[in-house]
Amino acid sequence: EIEEILVSASLLPITINRSANAITVIDRNQLKNRAVTSVSDLLRDVAGLAVSRSGVQGSQTQIRIRGSEANHLLVLIDGVEANNPSQSDEFNWGTLVASDIERIEIIRGSQSSMLGSDAMAGVVNIITQSAEQPFGIKTFAEAGSFDTQNNGVSVELKNEDFDMRLGISHLQTAGENISRTGPEKDGYENTNVNLKSNWSATDQLHLTFAARQADGINEYDSDGNFDSLIDDQDQVSEFRNVTMRLQAHHSSIDGRWQHQVSVGQSTNDNDEFTLGIPGTATNSTKEQYRLLSSLFWDKQKQRASFLMEREEEEFQQRGAINDYGVFGIYDPNQSRGRNTDSIALEYRADTSKKLTLGVSARYDDNSEFKRGNTARIEVIYQINDHLRLRSAYGTAIKNPTFTERFGFYTNFIGNPSLEPEESVNWELGIDRQFLEGAFSLSATLFNSELDNEIDGNFMDPITYRYTSKNREGSSKRQGIELTTASKLNDVLFFNTSYTYTDSVELDGDNHYADEARRARHTGSLNLSWQAMAEPAH
């Protein structure tokens, strides 16, 4: 049968074969066998994802799904929204190391109807490790080229009702020099602390606390003389990213009623230095308060969920005020905030062993923008144990970022009158297994049309300064994803992925042209071998 793994493609976890999304799950064994230090290196193999890094390891790293913008992808770490409001609502993948991670779920396709604005194109859900044994201590040490070291230790304990795990790791490298002049290498350091605990207070009440902190520096070069070439410059960015969440889950004795109450927070601090002189500093905080109630009936075949959520965001930036003459005064000092109150409804039904229906809708009342409404419907048909069809249609929104509304760059003025981006999207997919599961094939057609797309590089013809504006017309994205997975024998595996993306937008002459930084063809081949077959369970 098509493998059933619980994933977060719904307000409550569901199995892959009951979701219409194209989903990839990377488990701990895959993370271990690939021996990567950065999660973004592993995600390059996932269909539909395009990874771009601006420099050496630790540099600003973006991931786009199906030709969308990098801030259309929502990143969750143990249920906490980790996107950084002070970096255009993007998640900086350059700061995420692979240590202490249990699994990564990549959900392609809009999830705005359940998770809100940042999930316009998809979700990456990162779940960290929990304790597995009564008491244990583990360590690891790695070394490589460029004076790279990766070390860590974890301590865990577990009994019948309680478990706790603490992991600490440190990655550092002397780096490389990517500039065309000068000898300076650009290094990177990242210290990661991860704490996770679970407590079953009663048979019906369970509490979970999770916290993760990444603290480090990355050195980088930039184009200092504006000749489009990278110059050897002594520039350093110090960062600290923290996520934490407390959740209580209660279930009735018969399991028909389930309730979740959670409080989550993410903070991001960035300080820039040039030749040791402090530059711009940013700080952002996002807090979420959620109440989720679900009712099951018809022998657990049908479920309705109701979500109430409040999100509070704050953004601060500090830096020196400079007068650029005709270009105006550059004042980076900003203190901004916004709140969003939301409700969401979801209904899911396994109408038969073969047919699954899902409907969801969300209402967002944002303190800065017009009220937003999003919805999604999906249909999954399991023809037999080895073949299923899936389809989905939905709408999504993406609110303007602090950067786009209150710009703070030289020769750039933000536009506080921006409207949210809106999209309509659909996808059709087929999943097929052959040779008793030894070979599997998945194919997905996708299409998305984006209105009110925000152009953050528009020159005002009156002031000759750059600003942001909502574009007229629609930008369009369509394509196909293909993935295969082959088990050649007990120790040899071969996986492939390919994505064709056609992403276009209207140019100045009102003609459709290819969008920048959107590769039309991406793909990967992965052959893996392990010395011993996995033990039977």
Image (cartoon, helix red, strand yellow):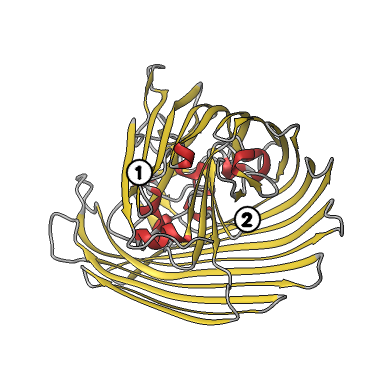
| 231 is higher (above) or lower (below) than 63 | below
Residue 420 in sight here: no
Q: Would residue 474 be found to the left or right of residue 216 on screen?
A: right
Amino acid type, mark 2: Glu
Residue 276 percent coordinates (x, y): 30, 72
**Which quadrant is the C terminus positioned in?**
bottom right
Observer-nearest of 473 and 105: 105
The residue indicated by pointer 1 is 326
Tell me what residue is drawn at x 42 percent, y 55 percent: 93
Q: Which quadrant of the figure has residue 335?
A: bottom right
Q: Which quadrant of the figure has residue 190?
A: bottom left
Local crowd at mark 1 within 10 Å, few (<14), some, or many (≥20)? few
Q: Would residue 27 be found to the left or right of residue 496 on screen?
A: right
Numbered disc in front, either 1 or 2: 2
The residue indicated by pointer 2 is 313
| 66 is higher (above) or lower (below) than 504 | below
SS under mark 1: helix
Q: Earlier in the sequence, mark 1 or mark 2?
A: 2
Tell me what residue is drawn at x 54 percent, y 77 percent: 166
Local crowd at mark 2 within 10 Å, few (<14), some, or many (≥20)? some
Residue 153 percent coordinates (x, y): 44, 79
